[in-house]
Each structure stands twice: as C-alpha cells, then as structure tokens.
Amino acid sequence: MKNSNTVSGSSGLSGRVKIPGDKSISHRSVMFGSIAEGVTNVSNFLDSGDCLSTINCFRAMGVKITKAGKKIRIIGAGLCGLRAPKRVLDAGNSGTTTRLMLGILSGQPFTSTITGDASLRSRPMKRVTVPLREMGAKITGRGDGNFAPLTVTGGKLLPIKFRSKVASAQVKSCMLLAGLYAEGETSVSEPRKSRDHTERMLLKFGVKLSVKGNRVSVESGQVLKGATIEVPGDISSAAFILVAASIVPGSKVTLLNVGINPTRTGVLEVLSRMGANIRLSNIRDGKAEPSADITVTYSPLKGVAVRGPVIPRLIDEIPALAAAAAVAKGSTVFSGIGELRVKESDRIKTICSELAKFGVKTKAFPDGMIIYGVAKLKPAAAAESHGDHRIAMMAAVLGQTIRGKTKIKRTACVNTSFPGFFGLLKSLRKK
Ligand code: S3P
C-alpha cells in the first residue's frame, strides 16, 4: 500500500461531497448487532481499517457478518451466543474496538486475548480494566493490566457504580456493555459528558437506560433486538475538509449528510468563533443520530481560547483545529486536552513538531498547547504522520495553503478512519 502522499497548494476548493460513515457509530453497529437477537442491517458503514478490525474480532467469535461495500448484515448471536475465539483477537489500531470489546469479553464464560498494533499496545487500558476487575472479570496484561495484549476470563459479573475520572465514551460504553452481563444495575458517571452514540444506539436495539446528567445506568438481563442502522457521515473526517475550505481563499464546499450529534459538534462552534463561514442545511433531526449538509466558505480566521466542557465534544478534531489555528490571526490556546497525550500518537507532541516544520511556533504544556498563527506557512521539507491518521490529514490540510508541493510520509494510516481522503481532497481542487 502507498505510504506517502504529496499534496499541492490550491487556488480554492469547491464541490459537494459525501464524507465516509461515522467511525464510532460503525463500530457500535457491529458490536451491538453481534450480541443482539435477530438481524441487523447497516448502511453507509465506514469501510476502514479500524471498523474492519471490529468485524474480524466478532467473526472470530462465530458471528456471521456479511459485507457488501458499505452495507453490512449481521446475524446476531445474542448476549450469550459468542464462541471462544481460537486465535488472538486483533484490534489493529483501534482503541474503541479494544475498550468496548473488553466490556463484552468480561461477560463471556471463556478466556480470550485481545491485542493490536504498536500504537494500540502502548495506550492505557487501566481506565477500563480496573473497574472491570472490580466487577469480577479476570484480566491480565503488562503494567498490571494497563497494556494490550490483555487476556480476559469473563463470566457472571457484579454490578458497579463507577465514577470515571476521564470524560471518555470508550470507558462509559465499556461499562454499560459489561453492565448488560452484571446482575442488577450498573451505572457510570463522568466529569463531563462524552459522545452518547452508545446510549442512542442501545435504545434503538430496545435496551432501556436511565440518563441523569452525566450519569448513565443500565439494568442487566435486557435483550438487544436486531435493528436497522443508517450511519451518517463522520464529523471528525468532515472537520479536515471544513478547515481546508475555511483557510484556502476562494473555497466553497458542501459536505452532505454529516452527523451533527450535539456531543460531537464542538468543532463547528469553535470554527465559527474563529470566524469561519459555516452554514447547516437539510437538517435531518428525527432519527437516532441527527445529520445535516454543511456548507463552508473561505473566511479569514482569528485565534481563540478552547477549553472547558467543549473539549470532549471536539477531542478528535484538535488536529484539524490546529491546522486552522496555524494560519489564524493571533494565538489559539487549547487547555484541558491531556487526553491527547494518549491518542493514536501523543498528539500535543506530534501536532507541535509537525507545525514547526511549517514555520509555526507553538508552546506545549502537560495538558494544553498554544499555537501562534502565521500569515503564511513555510513549505515543509517532509511532513510525517507519526503513524497517526489525523496528524497526516492535518499536514495535508496545511499543504493546501502552500504554493508548490508538500510531501507527507507514512500516510497509509489515514485508511483507519478516512479511506479515500487524498483522492477526495484532490477532487475538490478548482480545475
Ligand atoms: C470514541 C471515543 C473517544 C474518541 C475516539 C472514539 C468512541 O475516545 O477519541 O476516537 O467511539 O467511543 P475516548 O473515549 O478515549 O475519549
């Protein structure tokens, strides 16, 4: 597979395009469909490396999943119908696959091992393995169960009232899934509200939950019933195109059918505060997951402060916002983003080191960073993804504003969330 890409400056991006399906929702459709009774049909599934890892993990536990492009059909095995896998489960690069599956595996009466690539094997798992052990699961792995490969021996679980220190949809979802296998009510609370796709989708599968502020509770013994899931476009992928069109003079782009779940739309609010010209149309509100068409027109941006409750609502969009901040007038200050240190790369570090190559000054803190915008970026000799899809896309967006070519190394990882990204960006260039 091609592992580097070259982008060149553009005199404007224009067009109407579809963005690939939402990654969080695609993962959940396979997981919930697998433990449901009956058939689940999914459309606009994200056909990417990460989501294929989830499909393969469930196939390894005997679930029948057929895939025709972006359409998936899952014959549910029921809550207790998964079979012991004969091989190690491979979650690839996907933290969501690993953390949510640990919740499901903890409820199974068999032993399984889950692992992934080098990046995944260095990501902290104690945030889920500690409470899962409290529920009764036996989990072993390096760093006292902090790092994959992790071996889980599950079974009947005890319910728990868990207060998570981090606002994390992966932690919340893991606990709710384990809660389905515990005897009684399991609840999880978080310091700030994280994305709520699990809550919305479980409801669609017929599971009753109680949501009070930042606390969600589930009763065990509920049966999931197969459902029909339409996956909207991924706002985290859309964010890169939104920023590219905002910062390249002469641009006007419409992104069709993008998810606008309020727990994910922080990026739209921050870009608007920076001066971006963003308009929503065709809002489809009546479904489990709302969506809209998003039109963005070039507009000069200014630096802003990004902090507080909006952070979990844009946690994956900070690399895209960093590209916007790099060319904004003044400085942009991100605070309370310590979680970026444990994403696919240490994103505070990788964002700052890549921006430096484009002549942008930054200051990094343990849980924040300042980006000092420049009027004109310097051509980077060679940008680098650090194996992180969103860092590669950040560099590609910056390259749109530079005369001449920008080479980005190690770009194969872009396929984990946004297959076709480079082709789509190219197709938007004005002829
Ligand atoms: C995700 C939750 C977020 C996000 C990740 C996907 C999910 O992670 O960064 O890309 O699908 O639940 P955390 O839960 O670790 O914040």
Image: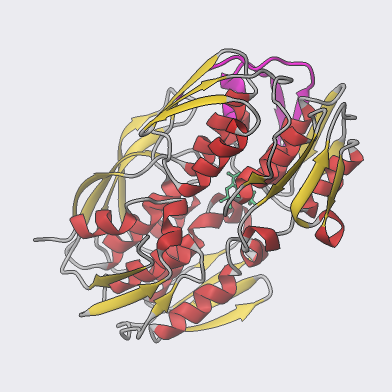
Residue drawn 53% across the image and 74% down it: 350
* Depicted 235 relative to depicted 389: above or below: above
Compare residues 355 and 294 and report the one nearer the observer: 355
The answer to whether one can see residue 273 in this image is no
Compare residues 147 and 2 and report the one nearer the observer: 2
Compare residues 220 and 62 and report the one nearer the observer: 62
Q: Which residues are magenta?
A: 200-229
| Quarter in which the C terminus is drawn | bottom left
Decide if residue 240 is on the left or right side of residue 344. Answer: left
Decide if residue 1 is on the left or right side of residue 385. Answer: left
Please provide percent x and percent y for residue 172. 71, 40
* Depicted 253 relative to depicted 326: above or below: above
* Depicted 251 relative to depicted 50: above or below: below
Query: Extreme front residue here?
Result: 86
Q: Quadrant of residue 171?
A: top right
| Quarter in which the N terminus is drawn | bottom left
Please provide percent x and percent y for residue 334. 56, 69
373 within the magenta span: no
Residue drawn 69% across the image and 50% down it: 167
220 within the magenta span: yes
Residue drawn 29% across the image and 67% down it: 247
Please provide percent x and percent y for residue 311. 59, 56
Please provide percent x and percent y for residue 331. 47, 77
